[in-house]
Every structure is written in C-alpha cells, then in structure tokens.
Amino acid sequence: MGIRFGGDYNPEQWPEEVWAEDLELMKAARVTMVTAGIFSWAKVEPRPGQWDFDWFDRVMDGLAGAGIAVCLATMTASPPPWLTRAHPEILPEGPDGQRRWPGGRQHYCPSSPVYRAHAVRLVERLAARYAGHPALALWHIGNEYGCHTRQCFCDVSAEDFRRWLRARYGSVEALNAAWSTAFWSQGYGDFAEVLPPRTAPTFPNPAQQLDYLRFGDEALRACYLAEKAVLDRLTPGVPVTTNLMPQHKPVDAFAWSAHMDVMALDFYQDPHVPDDHLRAGYAFDLMRAARSGQPWLLLEQAPGAVNWRPRNGPKPPGAMRLWSWQAVAQGADAVLFFQWRQSLGGAEKFHSAMLPHGGTDTRIFREVTALGRELASVPGIEGTRSRAGVALLSDWPSWWALELDSKPSTALDHSRIALDHYRPLFEAGVACDVVPPQRDLSGYRLVLVPNLYLLTARDAARLAAYVRAGGRLVVSFFSGIVDEHDRVHPGGCPAPLRELLGLWVEEFWPLAAGRSVAVGDGVYTGRADLWSEALVLEGAEALARFTDGDLAGRPALTRHRYGRGEVWYLATRPEPALLRALLDDVREAAGVAPVLPGLPAGVQATVREGAGGRYLFLLNHGAAPVEVALPGPMRDVLARGAEGGDRAPAGRRITLAARGVAVLTAA
Ligand code: GAL
C-alpha cells in the first residue's frame, strides 16, 4: 500500500466534466488516497430528508475505478442553510451572548441535540450506502473539531453543562467545594443557578472556567462519538479518525486518541517562520506518541501558500517535499494536502492546491507529481516505528489552567515553554515522545516536565516513583502548584513535588517584559528571562544561581538525588544555549544517545524500523548544502532516479542539498 498520498477532494465545486480529468491527473500524480465529502451536506441533502447521493456514487465509483482509496468524510462539518433556518437554536453563541451566524462553517453548538440528531441521521444514510464500497478505506468524522467554534455559551450548552456537572460532582455542595465558591459570594444553592463562564465584570471563577474547558472538549467529543457509534455499527472494520489540529487548545488530543483508530493531523508550516519545522516536529512527536508509536496520518498540509494568515508565504522550491518527508520521518504513513484542485470561488480561492489555477504546467504540480512518484518508489516505510528514550510531558488540563487569568504572570504560554524544552532535543537529533503525565514512564531514560502547573497528587506520586526507581527527571518552574480544581496544594509550593525536588518555592518572582537576569556561578552560565522563583533548598544542591537582579545569590538550577534516580529543577527560563548545555549533560547522565552524533546545525535525523526495514531519515532544514557523517556505509533509497533526489552517499558521508532529504538504509 505504501505511504498514502493525496488530498481533500471537493468535486461538488466543479462540473462533472472536470471529474474525469481529475482522475487522470490524480493517477499521473500517483495519488493513492483522497478525503472526499467534507463539505457535501447541502448537496447530498438539499432539502430536509430529500437525499441525493447519485452524484456522490459517481465520485466514489470513479475513484474506485482509478484505484484511489477514499477517506470518506461524514459531511457534518457545515450544516446546510435549511437546517439553521428551521432550527436557529443550533447556532453557537460566544461568551458575550453574541450569536455566530451561518455563512461560514462549523456554525453549530456542539451540545445541540438537534444538530447531533441531524448529523447522526446523515451518517446513518452515508454509512449504509457506502458500506462495502471498494473505495472506502477510512472514515473521517467532522472536520477539525473546535477550529472555529471552540466553545459555545448558549442556553442549550448551559443546560448540558449542568448535566455534566451533576454527573461529575453529584451534589451542589461538592461543586461549591471544588469551585472554591466561598470566595466572592459565589455559593450555589442549586445546579439550576450555574451558568457557563460568560463575560463577567471581572475574572470569572477559575475552577468554573477550567471545568468549562473540560466540558467544551467533551461536548465536541460527544459529537464525534455519536457519529462513530453509527460507523462502528454499520461498517465494522473500517477505521475511523478525525483530523486534529496541532497544539489545539480546545481539543485534548490525548483524551481523543483513545477513540481514534488512527491519529490524524493537519499541519500548515509557515514558510515565513524560519524554524516552524520545530513546531511541526513537536506536533508530529505528539501524534506518534499519543497512540504509543502507532503510525499516524498527515491529513492536510498546503502544497504552497495558505489564505488565512495575514501574509501568506508560498513554499519555496523543495520545502513542500522536505516538510512532507519530515512527517514521514516522524512516523506518518500518509501525506495528504488541502486540497486537490484549487477553488475558483469561495473563501479559499487563494489557498494553494495540488492542481493550481494555472493547471499542470506549474511548479506546484510538478513538485506534487515528483513527490507522489518518490513516495511510491519507497515501499516498506509504512508501518515502521520509532523508539524514543526521552519523554516530554504535556497535559491539556494543566495548559487550560495555566493560561487562565489572574496569575503571577500572564506571559506563561504552555506551547512556548514546551517548545523551549523540545528544541534542544530536536536539534541534537534525540528521539522524543510527547506524552501525558498518566503514561507509563518506566521505559524512558529521561522525562522532561516543561511546566505542569496543574498536577494531581496522584500524578506527582507517579513522577516520584519513576525517579525513585532510577529515572532522570527535569522539572521546570511553576509546576505542581494546583490540583484538578485549580486549588493551590497546601504545604508550600510545589507541595506534591517538594520531597522529590528537595526544595520549595518561597515566592514567585516573574520578570518584567524584556527583562533578563544573569545565571551562573558554576558550569552553567548565561542569561534567563520570563520568570524566576525564590527557592529554599531542602536537600537539593544548587548547580547555578542568579547572579544579579532581586534574587541574586539564590539558586536558579538545582539537582536532587532521589532514590536511585535524579531530578533537576529550573527556577527560570534559561536562554536556548544554556538550556541546551544543561539538557545535553542530563541526557548523557541518563545514557540517551542522539540518533546520529554531531549533527550539523539545521539537520534533523530520525529512525523508523520494523518489518519493512530500518530507515535513517536525514532532513536539511537549512538553506545551504551540508555534509553529514554516517555511522557506516549506507544507501539513499531516494537517490535512485527520483527527481530532485540528493547525491548518493559516497562511503560514510552524504551531502544534503539545501532543503535536501535522504532516506538511508544499510548498504
Ligand atoms: C483546514 C481545513 C480545510 C481548509 C484548510 C485551509 O483548517 O480543515 O477545510 O480550510 O484548513 O488551510
């Protein structure tokens, strides 16, 4: 089957005469899979209960005839106008009570029973009709849940929230305790008094906001699950997925992963951001690790420019190939795009497509075709896996709680802090899994905790057990502060980690914007910014201290031996070189080697292995050619005639062109 290659296919935007050409050109581009039907609801059900699937039958049959598999969308992402006219109550509302009107897409309240019932009705039709169809390979539910409507605050949602709270807390007394409602006279006498955290004169109750984020995620998931139940019943055996977005706050990818047969991601690297491949790397490592290393699908990326950033940079020659291979290098078994044929009308007419307005005699179509051919030329990668010695912990509830208002600093940004810690690993060529704190960590030699503001006593105990058994742990500032209700753990912050870290935090000392402090007094010297803490050591040793600023003389970086392991603690955000130096040393202490030692700057290295072979991927994200030393004589499987292939390795060295890619196997 190989690595799947293709894109979103929206034939309803085109007269049928064009479809035959689509199929011919798809074959020429070696397309093997398309995602079809995402926005087809209004066309398959033009009037309530009046179905027109005939045209879609022809699409499916044509694709099957061309040997192209279909990732079939459930068509529920954009309700048709007749539905919102008949039921305006399905339209979502913002926290300010403002209704979001139709005219775009995703204009439905996730809690709406009316929306869900109509969606399920449609999916029943669809699944019954295409069960057993030769083209049907995979189901794609909805589209990018929470992309536009992240949360809804309408009365229907309010009622659903109360139901959710009753199930979670059982009694209004328990709710009052969890939400600390003694503060600001918020005590509830009845669940009926509870509302979503709508726009209030000042900070709404943080525990209420946190629960609303949990509830919002579950409401979206309930839509997904309602459709999935139909698919599992009518087409058992056909895998089901949905396209997640990277670092997407409203949707807890780890919670969703349990309900997805295969993980799938949309990722749009920004050509104007020189190191956006790092953000991609993090998202890809999370996708792969979410289902314990199972290959995942890149369901959307752009062949060139997008249309939705303020300035939309095209992908320069080679970037689309490089970033596609990056996904494969990090565990993807599919490289799909948005979209096959560039629209002439609508909001996305300036979004690039595999087949641009200019047709086949275009740079983009040539690059697309070359990539399709290249992917088809390398069977065997599909299904192979990567092994990581390092885990980086990430947690949606902690992210949600961290970025609520009324904190020591609003400058703490979960994704940014996570990437700060991910960067030195990525740059050193160290394989890393991004996993939730509940994951079994015993197989990892090193665990990084960039920031876990919210940490339950139970998860803290698991971290301690990991270190006690010999694990190496790095914890950064403002971690282990609150419980699942955003209540400070009593006993001196970070109470549940205090014994493990061998220290406590007397005061948080966030730094002013643009301000940095010197850190030094030992091996680790440099500058740090954003945040600092007044630590009191209770067994940990200081590896570096603040050497200027208000906390001069106090520890900035500590180490504590605990059980058979060791834990490092960072009380500030070190500049990248300093963090890299620390993590290099910690990695060495933990015995974690990079995939390839001495990687030149800008080169990414990963390994996938399995029944199909062992592949070393080298990707040059830099703009100049670079030479890389190999562990032994190797063969570049892409160099065999693939257009734009890099020079075959000469002995134990390989030259990667600017944006070059090599996929190496033992010679
Ligand atoms: C995604 C979406 C696609 C298309 C694409 C454009 O967010 O799923 O339908 O809009 O963006 O980049």
Image (cartoon, rainbow, N blue to C red):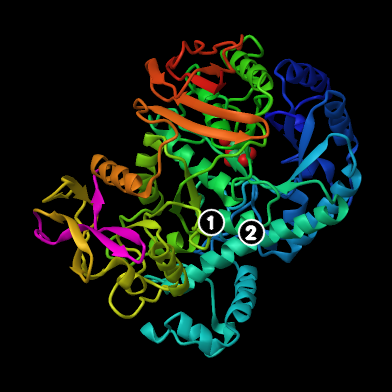
**Looking at mark 1, is its residue's CB closer than 8 Å to ligand 1?**
no
Using the image, determine if residue 576 lies above or below residue 457.
above
Residue visible at 33% across and 80% down in the picture: 490
Looking at the image, is mark 2 or mark 1 earlier in the sequence? Answer: 2
All told, the count of numbered labels is 2
Residue visible at 38% across and 72% down in the picture: 482
> Which of the two residues, 193 or 210, is positioned nearer the viewer here?
210
> Which of the two residues, 553 or 147, is positioned nearer the viewer here?
553
Q: Provide the residue designation for mark 1.
A: 250
Residue 212 left/right relative to 424: right
Q: Residues within 10 Å of mark 1 (few under 14, many from 20)?
A: many
Using the image, determine if residue 171 lies above or below residue 280.
below
Element type where label 2 sits in the image: helix
Residue 36 left/right relative to 585: right
Residues rendered magenta in the picture: 548-575
Residue 416 shown in magenta: no
What is the CA distance from the residue labelled 2 to the residue labelled 1? Answer: 9 Å
Q: Residues within 10 Å of mark 2 (few under 14, many from 20)?
A: many
Using the image, determine if residue 137 lies above or below residue 304.
below
Q: Amino acid at mark 2?
A: Leu
Residue 565 shown in magenta: yes
**Mark 2–mark 1 CB contact (< 8 Å):** yes
Residue 625 left/right relative to 334: left
Q: Provide the residue designation for mark 2.
A: 220
Element type where label 1 sits in the image: loop
Where residue 603 appears, x then y in whole percent?
41, 27
Look at the image and tell me whether residue 148 can be seen: no
Look at the image and tell me whether residue 452 can be seen: yes
